[in-house]
Amino acid sequence: HVLPPNEDDARWAGLSRAELEAYWMPFSGNRQFKDDPRMIVGAHDCYLRSADGRDILDTLSGLWCCSFGHGRSEIAEAIGRCAKELAYSPPFQFGHPMAFQLANRVRELTPDGLDHVFFTNSGSESADTALKMAKAYWRLKGRPEKTRMIGRIKGYHGVNVGGTSVGGIVGNRKHFGSLMESDHLSATLLPENRFSRGTPEHGVHLADQLEELVGLHDASNIAAVVVEPMSGSAGVIVPPAGYLKRLREICDKHDILLVFDEVLTGFGRTGSDFGATLFGVTPDIMTLAKNITNGAVPMGAVVSSAEIYRTFMDNGGPDYVPEFPHGYTYSAHPIACAAGLAAMDIFEHDRMAERAGAMAPYFEEQVHQLKGLRHIVDIRNLGMAAAIQLEPHPREATRRPFEIAMRCWEKGMYVRFAADTIQLGPPFIVEREQVDQMCNILADVIPTID
Ligand code: PLP
């Protein structure tokens, strides 16, 4: 897809090919991008603006993080005000009011029992913070040997060492040698669940694997089980009916903490406020990020149970000494808190979770209309999240989703491709016509790829 030279200039946004080399792009094929750049120079509502002047339909809310729509002026104004008044405030041993206000907003929204909010700057930092919190908790309880973490195959918990360890995406792990002590449950993908709509029927028994891992490692060595209530990054893997409840029961039976990574599912994606709310299962620790600021400023959060917080407070030594020796220069950054408060206003006042829930049946119906097209071997969905799984290309297993995404970009649509899936997670403000457009473009493109 070579464009004429005059359009080429616009696509490079005034940068030379050589200048593109200075930026080492994350999770990107740098060589391919720099030969064929896809520059984004603006965004509003459900659209990204490309450097060559096109409005591109955003089918993934950025990276699942701008779920209330791009360019929210309330957030921009809050950021601007804060940048003038308090662009930075030291977070260790000193505080600013917005951090406490935002913690209370998050606490009110999260399920009862999750009461104390520790701020980070990303989902990855939230994952590693949660793991350190779990380990330190057991040490304070006099059980320092409880250190092993149980994750799940195909789970994604960001890219820091702890999150990479409990994560279960081989491509993200294999380059990095030995990581933290962990073990993994199976992914909950079963052939009999293919093309399920919403929660799949089969597979609650997969939760019983946790008993096997307890049998292998002994509960006295296990700190926590870490799962996404719905895996997003590995291609929208929805837990089978009853699965999360069963995990909760087994964790309770053996004194193992349950951590829900709600970085992606938090604040409405499933049509409920949180995955925990939807599935009626409350973890001991919940991690958050992404929508907490509607993607406008990096921020994450770890929400702990009262029991965990109290254990730290009651065993903390002199009262001026940090009970949890952990934190970041930018923990509870004022600009992130200002953005977070404005995003929480939008989330509540515009009833974003309900809006996602109201559009979800139409979205499900349209996405499942793609069943039967060449290459498609599974379609999965929950709330405003869906993934289309493609048959692997005979020579390069992950080539097809990439080719499809490139073809969609040419046609004015951004889709995320990862491994063998195309993932869809549009902003909750998406209209039916835009859902139609999304599915029509995919229906045009997918069968024409080799
Ligand atoms: N956990 C989950 C469930 C995620 O989906 C992601 C990002 O996609 C992360 C953690 C990592 O978040 P971040 O990229 O902000 O570090």
Image: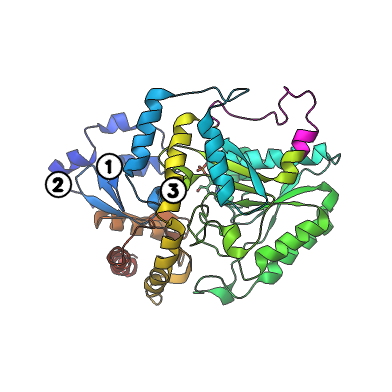
Q: Residues within 10 Å of mark 3 (few under 14, many from 20)?
A: many
Q: Identify the magenta region.
A: 311-331
Number of callouts = 3
* For residue 409, side relative to residue 284 (left or right): left
Q: Is residue 111 above or below residue 81?
A: below
Q: Tell me the kind of residue under disc 3.
A: Cys
Residue 124 seen in the figure? no
Residue at 75% x, 34% y: name it: 313
List the residue tagged with mark 2: 4
1 or 2: tag closer to the N-terminus = 2
Task: Report which quarter residue 308 is drawn in.
Answer: top right
Residue 330, magenta (yes or no) = yes
From the image, state whether disc 1 or disc 2 is nearer to you. 1
**Numbered mark located on residue 445 in the image:** none
List the residue tagged with mark 1: 42
Percent coordinates x, y for residue 436 in the rendering? 30, 68
Tell me: is circle 3 under 8 Å from ligand 1. Answer: yes
Q: Could you tell me what secondary structure mostly forms the magenta stretch?
A: loop
* For residue 102, side relative to residue 310 (left or right): left
1 or 3: tag closer to the N-terminus = 1
Of helix, strand and loop, which one carries label 1? strand
Tell me: is circle 2 under 8 Å from ligand 1. Answer: no
Q: Tell me the kind of residue under disc 2.
A: Pro
Percent coordinates x, y for residue 299 in the rendering? 50, 38
Q: Alpha-carbon distance for marks 1 and 3?
A: 16 Å
Residue at 59% x, 51% y: name it: 110
**Numbered mark located on residue 65 in the image:** 3
3 or 2: tag closer to the N-terminus = 2
